[in-house]
Image (spheres, rainbow, N blue to C red):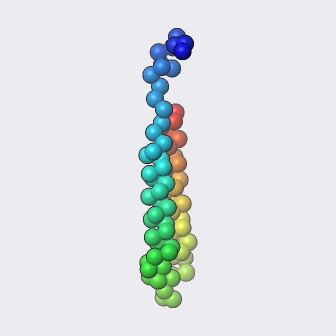
């Protein structure tokens, strides 16, 4: 196994994909909790605002985007 002449190449750490996977699982569980559980009855009630399902999906997408951004920041 040849060693690199550049010390930075040997010291570079690989990103921890377990943290990313944990965040994805948490987002999926929260989305499933909102859209499949009895909470579905709360936000789909006839007197709820029409935009509430879209707002909930926007929040889920925003959290996924934040996790993706954090993941790419650590890969630099």
Residue at position x 48%, y 79% in the image: 40
Closer to us: 26 or 67? 26
Q: Quadrant of the N terminus?
A: top right
At which x and y percent is residue 53?
53, 75
Location of residue 54 with respect to 66 vertically, above or below = below
Residue 18 in which image quadrant = top left
Extreme top residue here? 5
At which x and y percent is residue 34?
46, 72
Closer to us: 33 or 66? 33
Extreme front residue here? 1
Q: Is residue 48 visible?
A: no
**How many labels sit on residues?**
0
Q: Is residue 25 visible?
A: yes
Location of residue 2 with respect to 57 vertically, above or below = above
Residue at position x 45%, y 70% in the image: 33
At which x and y percent is residue 6?
51, 14
Residue at position x 54%, y 60% in the image: 61
Closer to us: 5 or 50? 5
At which x and y percent is residue 9?
51, 20
Location of residue 57 with respect to 24 vertically, above or below = below
């Amino acid at each position: 196994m040849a060693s690199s002449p550049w010390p930075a190449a040997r010291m570079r750490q690989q990103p921890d994909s377990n943290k990313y996977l944990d965040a994805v699982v948490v987002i999926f569980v929260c989305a499933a909790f909102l859209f499949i559980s009895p909470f579905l009855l709360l936000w789909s009630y006839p007197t709820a605002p029409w935009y509430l399902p879209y707002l909930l999906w926007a929040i889920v997408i925003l959290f996924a985007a934040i996790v993706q951004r954090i993941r790419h920041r650590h890969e630099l």
